[in-house]
Image (tube, coloured by chain):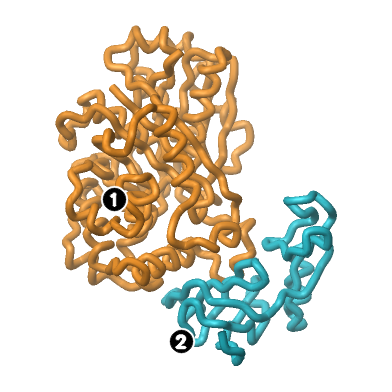
Amino acid sequence: MEIAIDSSNTQKFTKASDSTTADLASKSIIDLLGNTQIQKAEIDGLIVSSSTNDSYLGNIVSEMVGIRPKFSTRVENLCNSGTSGVMLAYSLIKSGLCKAVLVTGVEKQNSQGNKLTWDRSRGVYDMPIHWAALYAQNHFRSYGTTEEDLAIISLKNHANANKNINAYFYDKQFTYSSIVNSKMVVEPLKKFDCCYPCEGSSSLLVLSEELAKRTEIPIWIKGISQNNQGASFASISKNLGSIISTRIAARDAFQQSNLRPQNIDIVEIHDAFSILELLAYEDIGFVEKGQGRKFMQESTLYTNVRGGLLGCGHPIGATGIDQTNEIVLQLQGKGGLRQKKGCKSGLVHNMAAAGTSTTVIVLQK
Amino acid sequence: MKLMDIIINSAEKDNLITTYCFSCNIHIWPPNRYCNSCFKKTGFRKIDRKGVLLEKSFSNLPDLIGHYGVGDFSGIRLIGSVDPSILPNDRIRISQVSVKDNKLNLEFSKSKIKN
């Protein structure tokens, strides 16, 4: 049985508002339900992906939107929460337990998910930028990558966000100069090499083949895989040249899909820091290790068209859902101002906590 | 008492320890009550202060301004401030152990032992 994604919705990413986590999730679901051929009564699964500590959130949101599903829960996997929810929905449908599962990703700006407090092994250097900068230094030293290369990635993603009304930086114009000359935070990463933690919600509907055939343009999940290497930076820092979880998740997702990196037309990459986009080019397999900067300059692959985490902001649980929605919209031809022509296959890359965990989803029209 | 609290209390006395599997003969970091390989109960053991710097950078964050890096010590990775002259792959030693805001605060210096 094939599994598809049909409808999607994303609310504008913002600074902290008065809305509760449940309010944000409900608004996104209500807007999605207004734009799908699937009836509310047919939805038999509801998953809320979030790093909030709000108890019983799946059932609270179910009640707020008037759905009485067979299965409801909250999924927490830090920055990888969103696509972890998609993977659970896929599994529920594949097993035959459910036929239509709503997945909503949501986060408040002050989420506890912005920092992994469990990992006290990092000592006083416990801010995420400290591990990201070590990955960057390693790439610079090994392959000659430069601050200017990272600024080009940041500029591309911020410019893409100017075409995405839901992006946090939708109406802020960046120049190469404003990015490359921004304040150095931890060498070589500057202010605009780093994503902005914000608030937001995003939803999608995962369907069985039978229900998907009733929809206008179903987008099929051809491959979905996750790999987890632990939780601490200490558990993975022996090899700073590569994100191992990404390599394994991508390999397995491609194997399941019978597709290869060269078959992918458009990709959403988890660019929480600009260096992570460069590493992902290599670890997903679009290019050989060390060739990321060359790939960035020469490739025709569409990358982070919605604006990435750098341009959209990063509402932890909502990010993976919005990344998936972007690929769905692009493959459906509903990308609006940022629609890219001729996209048939797309890929989502969503990860967490220094790259200890990655999910990769391969989607096809 | 939480394992990390025991380690922090010990570090306040300049004694750097972590959990150790006496069956597999490996240090375990972050600390764990059980070895995740053989599942036997762990004990505590001093961390070897001699290691190798894997990578380094410079932080401009308030209270942390300066060079820092990640080093490998007896198979476990620790993060600490580093002397600016130290380069990746250099032999290092943990020259100072302290606690700041209930967090481990380590300093790495160049080891006098040659490669």
Residue drawn where x is 36% and y is 72% of the image:
A141
Q: What percent of the width, then of the height, locates residue A142?
A: 37, 68
Q: Identify the residue at the far front of this view.
A: B115
Q: In this view, does A296 lie above or below B98?
A: above
Q: Is residue A70 above or below residue A310?
A: above
Point out the image quarter for the C terminus of chain A: top left
Residue drawn where x is 51% and y is 72% of the image:
B54
Q: Is residue B103 left or right of residue B65?
A: right
Q: Are marks 1 and 2 on the same chain?
A: no
Q: Is residue A190 left or right of residue A180?
A: right
Q: What percent of the width, then of the height, locates residue A101?
A: 48, 20
Q: Name the residue under label 1.
A: A311
Residue drawn where x is 47% and y is 67% of the image:
A130
Instruction: Residue A63: tell me if it is visible.
Output: no
Callout 1–callout 2 Cβ contact below 8 Å: no
Q: Residue B84 carries which label?
A: 2
Q: How crowded is mark 2: few (under 14 residues within 10 Å), some or many (20 or more)?
A: some
Mark 2: which amino acid?
Answer: Pro
Mark 1: which amino acid?
Answer: Gly
Q: What percent of the width, then of the height, locates residue B60?
A: 42, 76
Mark 2 falls within which chain?
B
Q: Is mark 1 on a helix, strand or loop?
A: helix
Residue drawn where x is 17% and y is 63% of the image:
A176
- Nearer the camera: disc 1 or disc 2: 2
Q: The orange chain is which one?
A: A
Q: In this view, does A40 lie above or below A52?
A: above
Mark 1 falls within which chain?
A
Q: Is mark 2 on a helix, strand or loop?
A: loop
Q: The cyan chain is which one?
A: B
